[in-house]
Amino acid sequence: MSTLIVLLPPRDPAVPSQEWQLPDLPFLLLDKAGRTQRAGRSSLALLPRASTTILMIAARDLLMLAATVPPLKGPRLRQALPNIVEDQLIQDPQTCHIALDPEPLGGGRKLLAVIDRGWFRFICESFAAAGQRNLRAVPVMRCLPQATAVLAEAQALAAQAEAANAALAAAKVDAEVNVETNANADADPAATSSALPAVAPATPMVAAVLGMVVPTAPALLGEAVPEASVPCVELALVRGLYGEGLALPAAAVAPTLRTLAGEAPVKLYRLSDMPGETQRASSTARPTVAALFPGAQPLTFETLARRACDCRFDLCQFEFSVQPWRLDRALLRRLRVPVMLAVASVVIALIGANVQWLMLARQRDAIHAQMTELLFNAFPKTTVVLDAPDQMSRQLQQLRVAAGELSPDDFLSLADGLARSLGPVPVNGIAALDYHDHRLEVSFKPQIKVDPDLGQRLARNGLTGAIDSSTGKWTIRSGQ
């Protein structure tokens, strides 16, 4: 199974939903063994087809937060999620798609990813219309190096903080009891000590510069973008359990990271080896990310894409989950021609079958009319015709009898043919002859052994013979 990994750009808030368009997208195509087949930048319609398509959602389009989730499933959980994150959103939560991380955080808490439902639906429907059926969407923050280690460390720090808070609460209760006891005993208040809150170690931060911000709103409004403007970059951050994205001027990245991280260590990456980066850099006079951040550790696009394959946080949940049996507009559009051909084939087959039946019916009627005419010509006194061939044979049999001729199925004709077919079987070996319904039943004596060539001799004399294995009788009929 091949895998296609695509990095999506962030949504431009200045562009209305009616004018949403996806630019040329960087992609990486892997075969079923994980080997790189193709890497490049292409429009959505020209992307290579693959069994699975993984979309790396931009950091600026996602809000990741931890919350206590009730033990619900399916539609009930989907209805409850907007009420859980309502206090932490500026946007109406009903217009957002909320996905849950499969890895629990403990204490009934889970990590949630919030994205605008209209933008996410536009992305999924656009890829589905382009033929990419099996979709997965992962946060690009989870694809950064050391993001998994930071997440595990943050979970451990959260557990330590909960234990410290519990110990602090217990210490405060003990201190209050000691204060009341010492006050009654006129003790020195300075002898009572209160527990100090434990200081949790600082959570490390992982940051990555994922490229330059390309403004699209001025171009759509017909305004010119000033060439001397300060370049802005896309910044993805991972801090413990959370991740976020920012669009910052290149000069403000370092002070912003120092302010957000505080005393925590910061690991800065810059995305490199982007497909089509050389052509894009040569076509514009703006400085590249490598020139703006020479001290950042390079992160290749292939490494980022391969880490997306290992991410288990799939944003395609609830109504966006992959359902192969669901017939959407894109599938119906592709199946339109095959369905029309199948319907046309069925209609043509039905028409052809009915035409052939009408032709055969006419031939049958013509043959019946011809047989009836022959019957009337041969026997004009016939008044009723029910079965012309049977009536003709019976009339001919009656004429043979009236003329003194023997019929092939008469007793005498069958007995004469049997006598000429006995061969080595003695005549006195016959025990009984029984004639009825135009057939002759012959019983041989027990001591007589009939040779196996009797049937062939009967056939040469115009008769057919068969032996009944249960009674040992031979049934002889006319071969005509």
Image (tube, rainbow, N blue to C red):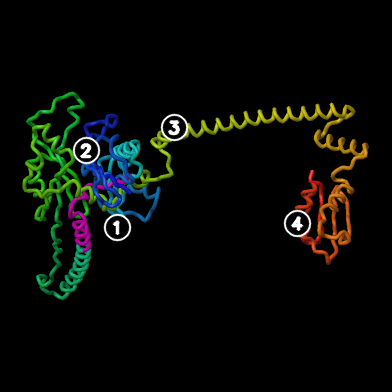
Q: Which residues are magenta?
A: 135-159
Residue mark closest to the camera, 3 vs 4: 4
The crowd level at tag 4 (other Cα within 10 Å; few <14, some 14-19, many 20+) is few
Q: Which residue is mark 2?
A: 41
Q: Observer-nearest residue: 200 or 261?
A: 261
Which mark, residue 337?
3
Mark 1 element type: loop
Whichever of callouts 4 and 1 sits on the residue coming sooner in the sequence is: 1
Q: Amino acid at mark 1?
A: Pro
Which residue appears farthest toward the top when viewing the image?
Answer: 222
Place of residue 285 in the rendered image (x, y in percent of width and height, measured from the top left): 8, 32
| Label 2 element class | strand
Q: Which numbered disc, 2 or 4, marks the residue that appears first in the sequence?
A: 2
Q: Which residue is mark 4?
A: 453
**Label 2 Cα crowd, 10 Å radius (few <14 / some 14-19 / many 20+):** some
| Badge 3 or badge 4: first in the primary sequence | 3
In the rendered structure, are the residues bearing label 2 and label 3 in contact, judged by CB atoms less than 8 Å apart? no
Which of the two discs, 1 and 3, sits closer to the camera?
A: 3
Quarter placement of the C terminus: top right
Q: Which residue is mark 1?
A: 104
Which SS does the magenta portion mostly show? helix
**SS state under label 4:** loop
